[in-house]
Image (cartoon, helix red, strand yellow):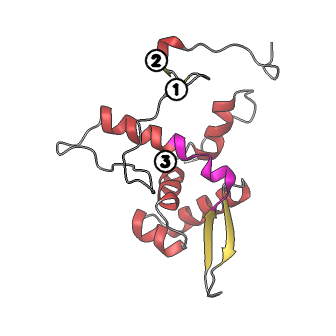
Amino acid sequence: MKYKTFDHMNCSLAQTLNIIGERWTLLILRDAFFGAKRFGQFERSLGIAKNILSARLNMLVDEGILQRRQSSAGAHTEYVLTEQGLDLQPVLLSMTHWGDKHRPHANGDRLIFVERESGRPIRRMGATSEDGRSLQPRDIRAVAGPALDE
């Protein structure tokens, strides 16, 4: 199924959806954050058709989200998150936290995200003011920035 692009929209969310709005893409990114690097690892984890996986990986490389490189052994290609890709971590964490809250499993959270160093759970994702206060949805409003079409 071909999806409509949002290239014509002057909207940051629409431009982001052009890249990561397809569900397989989000699951590929999830696996990349969990350490998958090789085509076969993504394929086994996701059960995705090779042609779809190849197209999604190529698009993520073309968009600068993943970088393709030779493995240290030199025999295989690896896909590694770039800085742009790493910047998507809060998006995936927010979506996971939303799923835990609104589509819970009877036994509790499926994953608990912790700090690597301390092993302590991280705070659920949310909006924070510049001075560090937690903000609720009704505390936030959007105002036009300099790039918004009038």
Residue drawn where x is 52% and y is 69% of the image? 50
Instruction: List x then y, in percent, for residue 55.
Output: 61, 61
N-term-proximal mark, 2 vs 1: 1
> Marks 1 and 2: in contact by CB < 8 Å?
yes
Q: CA distance from mark 2 to mark 3?
A: 27 Å
Q: How many marks?
A: 3
Give the labeled residue for mark 2.
Answer: 136
Range of residues picked out in magenta: 81-91
Q: Residue at x 64, y 46 (%)?
A: 19
* Number of the label disc, if any, that sits on residue 127: 1
The alpha-carbon separation of the residues under discs 2 and 1 comes to 7 Å
Residue 12 in which image quadrant: top right
Name the residue that disc number 3 marks: 23
Disc 2 residue type (three-letter): Gln
- Above or below — where is 79 with respect to 147? below
Q: Position of residue 139 (x, y in %)?
A: 51, 12
Mark 1 belongs to which amino acid? Ala
Query: Which of the two residues, 70 or 21, is positioned nearer the viewer here?
Result: 70
Does 58 appear above or below 92?
below
**Circle 1 or circle 3, nearest the eye:** 1
